[in-house]
Amino acid sequence: MVLWIAHATMIGFFTFIFVATMQAFKLKLFRNLIFCLGVLLFVNATLEDISPLLNKITDLATGGKKFEMPAQGTITQNYDPPNHHGIDIAIQTGTPIFAQGEGTVIEARWDNIYGQAVLIEYDNGLQALYAHNKDILVKKGYPVIKGTKISYSGNTGNSKGPHLHYEIRQKGKVVNPFLYLRN
Amino acid sequence: MGEIAKSFFGPGTPGMIMMGVLLAGFITFVGERFLSSIGRGTWAVLFKTGMEVSAILAVVGVALKLLSKIFGLSQGSGF
């Protein structure tokens, strides 16, 4: 909350100064553009700062749509669309990756970007992608339960080091994985 | 407070675009006055229009970037 107030104050202050300056020079279009940018920045900052609260609400609303972390390791890259659609977890090559719930393997194949990748549709309606594996242990159509070993992690495809690239998708669209992962 | 300012107005941030629009406004004002004063009225109008279009495009770019982030419109890469 304190952070949000600090962000809002900062954005409001600078937006006001800039808008007033442009008004003084009678540059109406530039004044309006700066005002629009200020509003966008404010909305963005608000959504980012209240994301912990949104997480709690989502947790309550999703009622059980929460997974354990797919692997224990350092998160080297966060969810940052459109640049990065999932999270990267640095783990050693050969680390076993397990299914996180009951579901069905809907893709298990090579992809030029994702390398050896597995896409699972879980019974809760979410899809999870496990990419850059060294070996895949399941095939398309295989049923899985929580704990089924699906692959060994690796460094295949467009990857610069051993890690697991993990995505969550809902109705085919990528979503923030942290909304569906337990802390 | 310094860190917060840096995160909003640092290189590559939307705040930087806001500073850019402010600067474009100043340049437009000065350039338009200058061109008008030397009797190049048409050039002045063209210069102002060009700067305005550039500023609009910059803001639209930031708006799309922020909106896509907010609504998570981005798709996976086809897998």
Image (cartoon, grey):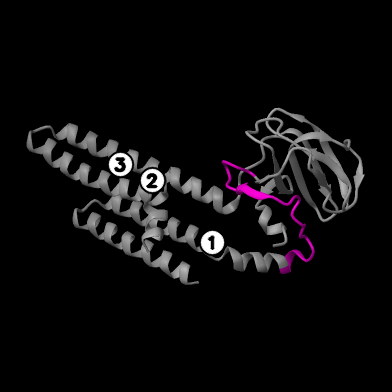
Secondary structure under the numbered disc 2 in the rendered image: loop
Q: CA distance from mark 2 to mark 3?
A: 22 Å
Residue density around tag 3, few if under 14, some if 14–19, many if 20 or more, within 10 Å: many
Q: Which mark is residue B52?
A: 3
Q: Is residue A51 left or right of residue A114?
A: left
Residue drawn 58% across and 45% down? A81
Q: Is residue B38 left or right of residue A105?
A: left
Q: Say if residue A13 shows up in the picture.
A: yes
Residue drawn 31% across and 45% down? B20
Disc 1 versus disc 2: nearer the observer: 2
Quadrant of the image containing the C terminus of chain B: top right
Query: Badge 1 is on which residue?
Result: A47
Q: Is residue B63 left or right of residue A135?
A: left
Q: Is A113 in front, or is B49?
A: A113
Q: CA distance from mark 3 to mark 1?
A: 30 Å
Secondary structure under the numbered disc 3 in the rendered image: helix
Query: Badge 2 is on which residue?
Result: B11
Queried whether the magenta region covers residue B47, the answer comes back as: no
Which chain letter goes with mark 3? Answer: B
Q: Is A114 in front, or is B55?
A: A114
Disc 3 versus disc 1: nearer the observer: 1
In the image, the segment drawn in magenta is: A60-85
